[in-house]
Amino acid sequence: MTLADLAPGDTATLKQINTTDPGVIRLMVLGMVEDITVRLENIAIGGDPLEVGFFGSSISLRKEQARYFEVTRIPASD
């Protein structure tokens, strides 16, 4: 499962990152690194871009780039 597969409100842990895209490296510099918890905040109309929150901040990224981030969904606690 990748970051692009999450639904708004889902929380997940980044497990593996494919670093073959230079844009992905820039996102890692912003803090998107393995073993952090991220939350898919919102998806724009049309499905692209995605708004992802982590460490109290949010960034937008293209769905194409989100596919480079492998995640494990964290089940919601009721």
Image: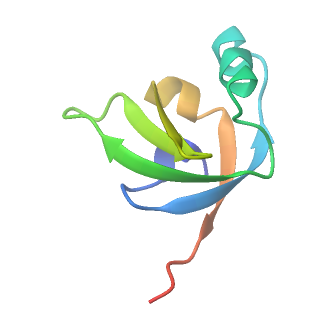
Of 60 and 57, nearer the camera is 57
Residue drawn at 39 percent across, 56 percent down: 7
Which residue is at the far bottom?
78
Asked if residue 69 lies left or right of residue 47, the reply is: right
Quadrant hosting residue 45? top left
From the top left corner, tell me how far across and down residue 18 is, in percent. 77, 30
Taking 41 as reference, is 68 above or below it? above
Quadrant hosting residue 47? top left
From the top left corner, tell me how far across and down residue 73 is, in percent. 60, 65
Taking 61 as reference, is 8 above or below it? below
The colour scheme applied to this rendered structure is rainbow
From the top left corner, tell me how far across and down residue 74 is, in percent. 61, 70
Residue drawn at 47 percent across, 54 percent down: 6
Give the quadrant of the C terminus.
bottom left
Which residue is at the far left?
45
Residue drawn at 51 percent across, 44 percent down: 53
Asked if residue 72 lies left or right of residue 51, the reply is: right
Taking 54 as reference, is 21 above or below it? above
Of 32 and 63, nearer the camera is 32
